[in-house]
């Protein structure tokens, strides 16, 4: 913001000696020195920026920030309890103390008996169990018209605090010992997703560690909306805010009325 063109300095009238050695004073408009950047310093010294759903140091992907008035919109979006989508990488054959591939090794196991079909059966069980939890924490009578209309719109979700809930999970890639999952969830942490990979390994009578957690969607924001480090400049950020305004407003009105 400070690198952007600033407004012209204010002008005031000064009586200066007449040019050419003439006698007398001449009224002249000159800039107010108090407006000079070297006098007043940077125009912006503080900027209120709020963080949305956070990412820990081992995760990457979409991370939403609010600037100025956007902080209130972040709160409204948080109250919508929108789902987030991650791609999660896993590696069969070992277990660590923090469920990640960089943690302290605590166990090595065989994994040759694991097939994609066996993995997908476990994923189906996880999704079914979490679907029951989703209905329970949404506090809806599933026999009512309201529940039916929310289900049609895809709006059945907890509108308050709840444990982490996985609304969808599927296998994207499977090449032993590596695999990759796509997980759609609510109220999660990245460490919770790493633990899910660990538990999948146990269910398959083996072990597994998480190699990657990448958020590819956070509510209405996707990777296409994200700015790379090289794009952190005023114009790119301004364009990103303009491009996202409509879908943020639409989602808040649809969910919160």
Image (cartoon, rainbow, N blue to C red):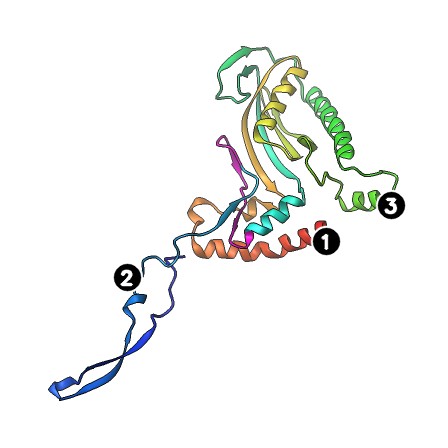
Compare residues 151 and 200 and report the one nearer the observer: 151
| Label 1: element kind | loop
The residue positioned 53% from the left and 17% from the top of the image is 97
How far from the left and from the top, in percent, is residue 125? Answer: 74, 24
Label 2, residues with CA under 10 Å away: few <14, some 14-19, many ≥20:
few
Q: Which residue is mark 3?
A: 145
Q: Quadrant of residue 24?
A: bottom left
Compare residues 139 and 111 and report the one nearer the observer: 139
Question: Above or below — where is 171 with respect to 250?
Answer: above
| Label 3: element kind | helix
| Residue 174 seen in the current view | yes
How far from the left and from the top, in percent, is residue 161? Answer: 68, 36
Q: How many marks?
A: 3
Separation (CA) of disc 1 from disc 2:
49 Å
Residue farthest bottom in this picture? 23
Label 1, residues with CA under 10 Å away: few <14, some 14-19, many ≥20:
few
Q: Is residue 56 magenta?
A: yes
Badge nearest the viewer, 3 or 2: 2
| Mark carried by residue 39 | 2
How far from the left and from the top, in percent, is residue 138? Answer: 76, 37
For marks 3 and 2, the one nearer the N-term is: 2
């Amino acid at each position: 913001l400070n690198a952007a063109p600033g407004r012209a300095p204010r002008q005031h009238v000064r009586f200066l000696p007449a040019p050419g050695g003439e006698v007398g004073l001449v009224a002249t408009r000159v800039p107010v020195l108090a407006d000079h950047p070297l006098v007043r310093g940077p125009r912006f010294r503080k900027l209120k920026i709020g963080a949305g759903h956070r990412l820990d140091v081992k995760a990457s992907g979409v991370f939403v920030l609010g600037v100025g008035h956007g902080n209130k919109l972040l709160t409204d979006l948080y109250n919508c309890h929108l789902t987030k989508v991650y791609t999660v990488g896993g590696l069969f054959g070992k277990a660590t103390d923090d469920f990640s591939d960089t943690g302290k090794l605590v166990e090595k196991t065989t994994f040759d008996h694991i097939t994609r079909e066996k993995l997908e059966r476990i994923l189906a069980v996880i999704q079914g169990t979490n679907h029951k939890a989703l209905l329970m924490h949404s506090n809806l009578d599933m026999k009512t018209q309201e529940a039916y209309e929310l289900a049609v719109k895809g709006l059945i979700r907890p509108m308050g605090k709840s444990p982490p809930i996985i609304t969808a999970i599927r296998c994207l890639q499977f090449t032993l010992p590596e695999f990759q999952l796509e997980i759609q969830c609510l109220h999660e942490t990245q460490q919770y997703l790493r633990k899910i990979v660990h538990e999948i390994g146990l269910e398959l009578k083996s072990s597994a560690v998480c190699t990657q957690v990448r958020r590819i969607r956070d509510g209405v924001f996707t990777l296409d909306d994200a700015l790379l480090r090289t794009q952190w400049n005023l114009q790119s950020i301004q364009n990103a805010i303009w491009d996202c305004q409509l879908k943020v407003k639409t989602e808040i009105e649809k969910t919160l009325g």
